[in-house]
């Protein structure tokens, strides 16, 4: 059975919605620390508490995208183990945003918001740091380091509206996106939601709106 994720797309306070279609990535507070002792009931500790977090095979992906000036980008952990986002970057050429050190248990996600009034207690404010996400064309790359031209450093990628964006060649070489393919969107599209990520490409995404 293909693993299907239904991801929340929020523009403000990190809320989530229920679904019967499969697992859900649940937003967490930026910079939070979650122990990996139990995948069923993770324990959240304050940032000031000293603790050892065991990390393993995390798989960080772009979970959802909301278009517009107040749009959002969701970065979630699709892997079987807890992992740390420390050192990861979001790349939307020529803009780049380094993510804060945040421990994500399986099924958890971090929300980056482009809204001017984004609350830093719930999301990562990125207004002015990343460009507005246009529905007609765009790309987002998720990197493990700031070496944006290295196929070994790109962890996930999505391209919509048209092909040939700056980071698409890196994603293609890394095997994360097929050549000459993009998710079909138009002016009525409001966002993208990741679904079956077993194979790279547009077929792993659902377009909302329209």
Image: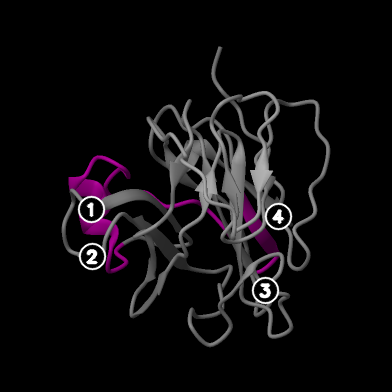
x, y (%) of residue 175?
24, 40
- For this rendering, which residue is in front, 135 or 81? 81
Residue at figure coordinates x 71%, y 77% from the top left: 118
* C-alpha distance separating marks 2 and 1: 7 Å
For marks 1 and 3 on the same chain, the one whose residue lies earlier in the sequence: 3
Region in magenta: 164-192
* C-alpha distance separating marks 3 and 4: 17 Å
- For this rendering, which residue is in front, 138 or 46? 46
Asked if the residue at tag 3 contacts the one at tag 1, i.e. Cβ–Cβ closer than 8 Å, the answer is no
Q: Secondary structure at mark 2?
A: loop
Q: Secondary structure at mark 4?
A: loop
35 relative position to 89: left or right = right
For marks 2 and 1 on the same chain, the one whose residue lies earlier in the sequence: 2
Q: Which tag is nearer the camera, tag 3 or tag 2?
A: 3
* C-alpha distance separating marks 4 and 1: 26 Å
Decide whether residue 203 is among the magenta residues: no
Q: Secondary structure at mark 1?
A: loop
Residue matched to label 3: 120
CA neighbours of label 1 inside 10 A, class few (<14), some (14 to 19), many (20+): some
For marks 2 and 4 on the same chain, the one whose residue lies earlier in the sequence: 4
Asked if the residue at tag 1 contacts the one at tag 2, i.e. Cβ–Cβ closer than 8 Å, the answer is yes
x, y (%) of residue 150?
16, 57
Residue 9 is marked as 4
Q: Quadrant of residue 132?
A: bottom right
- For this rendering, which residue is in front, 81 or 49? 49
* C-alpha distance separating marks 3 and 2: 26 Å
Where does the N terminus fall, quadrant-wise?
top right
The correct choice, above or below, for 116 with respect to 104 in the image is: below
Residue matched to label 2: 148
167 relative position to 1: left or right = left
Residue matched to label 1: 153
Answer whether residue 186 is visible to the viewer in this image.
Answer: no
């Amino acid at each position: 059975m293909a693993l299907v994720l239904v991801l929340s797309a929020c523009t403000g306070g990190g809320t989530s919605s229920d679904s019967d279609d499969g697992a859900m990535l649940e937003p967490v507070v930026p910079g939070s620390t979650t122990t990996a002792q139990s995948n069923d009931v993770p324990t959240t500790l304050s940032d000031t508490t000293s603790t050892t977090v065991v990390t393993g095979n995390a798989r960080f992906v772009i979970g959802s995208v909301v278009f517009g000036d107040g749009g959002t980008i969701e970065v979630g952990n699709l892997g079987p183990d807890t992992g740390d986002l420390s050192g990861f970057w979001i790349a939307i050429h020529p803009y780049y945003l380094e993510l804060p050190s945040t421990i994500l248990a399986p099924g958890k996600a971090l929300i980056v918001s482009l809204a001017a009034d984004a609350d830093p207690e719930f999301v990562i404010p990125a207004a002015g740091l990343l460009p507005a996400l246009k529905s007609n064309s765009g790309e987002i790359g998720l990197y493990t380091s700031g070496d944006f031209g290295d196929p070994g450093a790109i962890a996930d990628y999505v391209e919509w509206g048209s092909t040939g964006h700056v980071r698409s060649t890196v994603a293609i070489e890394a095997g994360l996106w097929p050549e000459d393919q993009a998710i079909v969107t138009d002016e009525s599209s409001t966002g993208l939601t990741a679904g079956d990520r077993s194979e790279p490409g547009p077929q792993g995404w659902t377009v909302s709106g329209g």
